[in-house]
Amino acid sequence: MADNKKNNVVEYYPSALTIAGSDSGGGAGIQADLRTFNALGVFGCAAITAVTAQNPETVTRIDLIPGAGVTAQIDAVASRIALRCAKSGMLGSAENASAVADAVKRHKLKLICDPVLVSTSGKKLCHDDAVEVIKQELFPLALWITPNIPECEFLLGKKLDSESDIADAAKEFSDRFSVNVLLKGGHNLKGSRAVDFVCYRGELYTLSSPKVKLPPCAGHGTGCTLSAAMAALTALNFSWSDMLQDAKAFTFGSLRENVEIGKNISAMYPPVEDALELIEMERYGTRKSRGIPR
């Protein structure tokens, strides 16, 4: 970088925007997203939808930002910065969800939508009236949506009891909202691998990594980190399948290389080692990873 400056050459950085809540404990939300953007070589911008008082164990207070404030943040960024992708996380209210949908349309943003409804500690993060707005206004605008199993069960109104149920749910989401889906399977306790179900242009795939035995709280922010990695890698012009596999590898590595941040409190952290060789992606129903478009 020093040589570039000496020769009057400015290094270009692709930019991505996170639209989410602030996590005062640093493990999830805006803080996790910006940490992920930076680790993957993307310039991070932010529009804050809520200020939360929390640590990895609990959320004690939530103060929502008005929709006009969210709009102003996105417009200010998009008016001068060449955003290549955006991700949305905690929106909190119907007003904020509508504001984000309008901004995505107005600025023609590529969007990774993580429908954050409940915190890891069980705190409700979204007003009831926001759910329909997210489903009807935001999902159809997204390039990808990334619900986890409990969110998917809530949004579809049914229990997912088996692997085939989860696969069918990913396809149902994709068909209903005309969107690509990464249905996160980390809440499924069965098996030795964490298996996500992907529906891309109507075709089903599985995306998996080994499961990691974690110390207390180290899984806080997993979904935020994954969707932020997807946004960063999209901004870096990765192909869809490479983007998913590298985002899964980054998230797995962040869990595996967790750090201690307090007594009996750990947190995921951007990895040093490359874990891509431990990630498997295959068409649903096959045994070997082949036939995946690159």
Image (cartoon, rainbow, N blue to C red):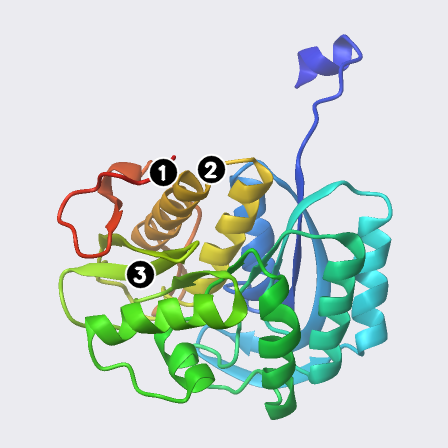
Q: Secondary structure at mark 1?
A: loop
Q: Position of residue 271 (x, y in %)?
A: 39, 43
Q: Nearer the viewer, mark 3 or mark 1?
A: 1
Q: Amino acid at mark 1?
A: Pro
Q: Find the distance from the CA under tag 3 to the CA under tag 2.
A: 18 Å
Label 3 or label 2, whichever comes before in sequence order:
3
Instruction: Tell me the quarter of the picture where residue 60 sits.
Output: bottom right
> Which residue is under mark 1?
293
Q: Nearer the viewer, mark 1 or mark 2?
A: 1
- Tell me if mark 1 has few (under 14), some (14-19) or many (20+) residues whose alpha carbon lies within 10 angstroms of its own: few
- Residue at image location 55% in from the left, 35% down from the top: 237
- Residue at image location 45% in from the left, 56% down from the top: 226
Left-right relation of 245 to 99: left
Q: Is residue 116 visible?
A: yes
Relative to 280, does residue 273 appear above or below in the rendering?
Answer: above
Q: Secondary structure at mark 3?
A: strand
Q: Amino acid at mark 3?
A: Asp
- Front residue of this view, candidates 206 and 15: 206
Q: Find the distance from the CA under tag 3 to the CA under tag 1.
A: 18 Å
Name the residue at the bottom extreme: 128
